[in-house]
Amino acid sequence: LKSVKRSMNTFIGNIEARLDSKGRTFVPAQYRRILAEMGSSHIIMRRDTDNECIIFYPEHVWQQKVSQLRNALDEWEPEDQLILMQFMSEAEILDMDSQGRILLQKKHLEMIGAEQDVVFVGMLDRFAIWNPSVFTEKQMPTQDLASRIRMRMKNKQDN
């Protein structure tokens, strides 16, 4: 059998990790490989707007999201200006150290209720960190997930 080198630039799976006393954690090796393949030397971190987790974006994905948001907003509309300011002010650029660790500020860890254990969750073009018990709590029963996927896929095909 011939060895085939696969390149898969999608973040998948869920990987448990620990925080050290300073709030550092290792980015999973498979995620670091993907970031390297993408040429992303920095990751942008932002608390999720709907869930109790922190989302991490490779640089180019963050730029796409910001561009989408900017195009959806009117820069002359005061409310849109506030939306953009708040969204951007809650973001932070992170660098990984030479060992592949990132430092998370205590305020961010407190927002998601993380103390020592976290779980990295792949989200295709980005990944998240959750408090493991909160992530488990948010999971749908398998049958509900299956029916929701079927419904959304069917709706997509009908459009």
Image: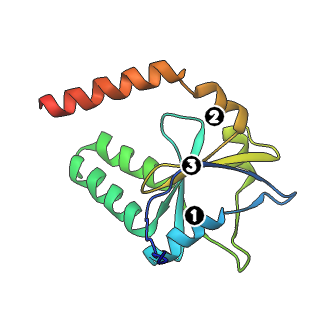
Q: Decide: marks 2, 1 in contact (CB < 8 A)?
A: no
Q: Amino acid at mark 1?
A: Tyr
SS at badge 1: helix
Q: At x 48% / y 39%, what residue is drawn?
A: 49
- Residue under label 3, please give it: 13
Q: Quadrant of residue 100?
A: bottom right
Whichever of labels 1 and 3 marks the residue nearer the N terminus, that label is 3
Whichever of labels 2 and 3 marks the residue nearer the N terminus, that label is 3
Q: Amino acid at mark 2?
A: Phe
Which dot, 2 or 3, sits closer to the camera? 3
x and y percentages locating residue 74 in the rendered image: 21, 48
x and y percentages locating residue 134 in the rendered image: 67, 31
Q: At x 73% / y 42%, what residue is drawn?
A: 110
Mark identifier at residue 31: 1
Q: Decide: marks 2, 3 in contact (CB < 8 A)?
A: no
* Residue 20 as seen in the image, left or right of residue 63: right
Whole-angstrom CA distance, mark 1 to mark 3, is 10 Å
Is the residue marked by circle 1 packed among few (<14), some (14-19), or many (20+) residues within 10 Å? Answer: some
Whole-angstrom CA distance, mark 2 to mark 3, is 13 Å
Which colouring convention does the figure follow?
rainbow
Is the residue marked by circle 3 packed among few (<14), some (14-19), or many (20+) residues within 10 Å? Answer: few
Is the residue marked by circle 2 packed among few (<14), some (14-19), or many (20+) residues within 10 Å? Answer: some
- Residue under label 2, please give it: 135
